[in-house]
Image (tube, helix red, strand yellow):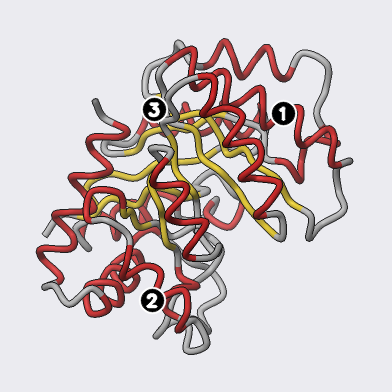
């Protein structure tokens, strides 16, 4: 069985003491590939270094909306320059967030637009963070789609079925993290069951969002994507092996073209 964790914050300090062991456990669990995702210029550079060091690790470079207020002059230019480095397979994490009040919303919108345009110019997928701002996200995606094709992932999806269907119609993939396994997430599981076979992805968003049945474990890690895959295979009424192969094929096509 082959698995692909499409979103992990492997650079985070929660992994500093045992990062090599974490990656080894992921490989042992069948995770052949994972995308280490940056949230700033500095963390994006670390992700590139991790991709160079560990087989099966790839990098996404970008500036997550909640950390934009900390950005320094020149950080965006660094992100743009990083796209030419080996191991970089995506732009992001980008997006919008109205839950946390860390960055003025107009600044978030500016950088979300920058990331999308960069994706469109370079042909790399972009990774979309979304929290309490579905309509804002859709408005900007529609505007971008009117400019040209979109290649990207709705990361850790929590939106409505209508939003999922519109994102799929615009060419985007839908990725599910540990939240889809939670007991109260019946509606989200129903949405996951309806995603077209060729557009569904899985992720951990580790070290966050540990899935059931290990939700009480404080630190999530890439090996745990198996639990999300198991849950979604059941929801979609397919075998785990078939679902793993499908999501891995989808991720390979998107990130490793």
| Location of mark 1 (residue) | 111
Do tag 1 and tag 2 residues touch (Cβ < 8 Å)? Answer: no
Among the two numbered marks 1 and 3 on one chain, the one whose residue lies closer to the N terminus: 3
Q: Residue at x 35, y 57 (%)?
A: 202
Q: Residue furthest bottom?
A: 183
Give the quarter of the image for residue 88: top left
Q: In x, y percent, where is residue 136?
A: 71, 46
Q: Residues within 10 Å of mark 3 (few under 14, many from 20)?
A: many
Q: In x, y percent, where is residue 5?
A: 34, 52
Q: Quick one: quadrant of the N terminus?
A: bottom left
Looking at the picture, tell me which residue is in the foreground, 54 or 199: 199
Give above or below for 159 relative to 138.
below
Q: Residue at x 33, y 36 (%)?
A: 54
Give above or below for 16 relative to 223.
above
| Location of mark 3 (residue) | 89
Do tag 3 and tag 2 residues touch (Cβ < 8 Å)? Answer: no
| Location of mark 2 (residue) | 190
Looking at the picture, tell me which residue is in the foreground, 197 or 222: 197
Q: For numbered disc 2, what is the local secondary structure?
A: helix
């Amino acid at each position: 069985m082959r698995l692909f964790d499409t979103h992990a914050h492997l650079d985070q300090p929660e992994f500093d003491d045992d990062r090599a062991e974490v990656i080894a456990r992921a490989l042992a669990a069948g995770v052949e590939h994972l995308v280490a995702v940056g949230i700033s210029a500095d963390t994006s550079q670390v992700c590139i270094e991790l991709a160079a060091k560990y087989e099966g690790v790839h990098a996404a470079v970008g500036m997550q909306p909640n950390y934009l207020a900390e950005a320094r002059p020149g950080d965006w230019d660094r992100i743009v320059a990083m796209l030419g480095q080996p191991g970089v397979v995506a732009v992001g994490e980008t997006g919008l967030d109205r839950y946390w009040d860390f960055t003025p919303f107009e600044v978030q919108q500016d950088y979300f637009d920058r990331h999308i345009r960069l994706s469109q110019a370079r042909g790399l997928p972009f990774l979309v963070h979304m929290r309490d701002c579905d309509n804002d996200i859709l408005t900007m995606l529609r505007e971008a789609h009117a400019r040209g094709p979109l290649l990207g992932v709705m990361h850790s999806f929590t939106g409505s079925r209508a939003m999922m269907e519109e994102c799929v119609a615009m060419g985007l993939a839908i990725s599910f993290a540990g939240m889809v396994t939670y007991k109260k997430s019946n509606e989200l599981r129903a949405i996951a069951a309806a995603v077209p076979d060729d557009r569904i992805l899985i992720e951990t968003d580790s070290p966050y969002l540990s899935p059931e049945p290990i939700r009480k474990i404080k630190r999530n890690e890439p090996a745990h994507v198996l639990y999300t895959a198991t849950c979604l295979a059941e929801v979609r009424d397919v075998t785990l092996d078939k679902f793993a192969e499908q999501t891995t094929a989808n991720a390979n096509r998107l990130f490793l073209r």
